[in-house]
Amino acid sequence: MILSELRDYLAETRRAPVAGLAHHFGIDEPALRGMLAVWESKNKVRIVKTDTNCDDGCTACPLGSCEICEWIGN
């Protein structure tokens, strides 16, 4: 996967759980976080922690520790 694929996916979906993104793209979470860091440094992405599970139903995250990636770029 390349950075532009991640950018395009997030620009379209606007929000996605970090664990769900890793699963969707078939990569491990540390590699995904490295790619997200590039977009965070450009103020295109923000990662927020939630107190509840996300609403996509994957249940990959322990209760209360789900991280949501939000596309905030154009």
Image (tube, rainbow, N blue to C red):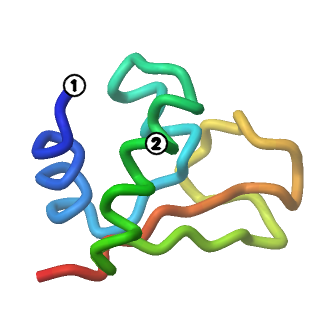
Q: Which mark is residue 34?
A: 2
Q: Residue at x 86, y 43 (%)?
A: 62
Q: Residue at x 37, y 70 (%)?
A: 41
Q: Is residue 45 left or right of residue 7?
A: right
Among all residues in the image, which is located at the extreme right?
A: 63
- How many marks on residues? 2
Q: Which mark is residue 23?
A: none
Residues 17 and 38: in front is 38
Q: Amino acid at mark 1?
A: Met
Q: Residue at x 74, y 71 (%)?
A: 50
Query: Where's residue 19, x and y in %?
Result: 58, 39
Badge 2 density bin: few <14, some 14–19, many ≥20, Cα 10 Å: few
Badge 1 density bin: few <14, some 14–19, many ≥20, Cα 10 Å: few
Q: Is residue 11 left or right of residue 66?
A: left
Query: Where's residue 74, x and y in %?
Result: 11, 82
Assess whether mark 2 and mark 1 are in contact (beta carbons under 8 angstroms).
no
Q: Quadrant of residue 14?
A: bottom left
Residues 26 and 64: in front is 26
Q: Earlier in the sequence, mark 1 or mark 2?
A: 1
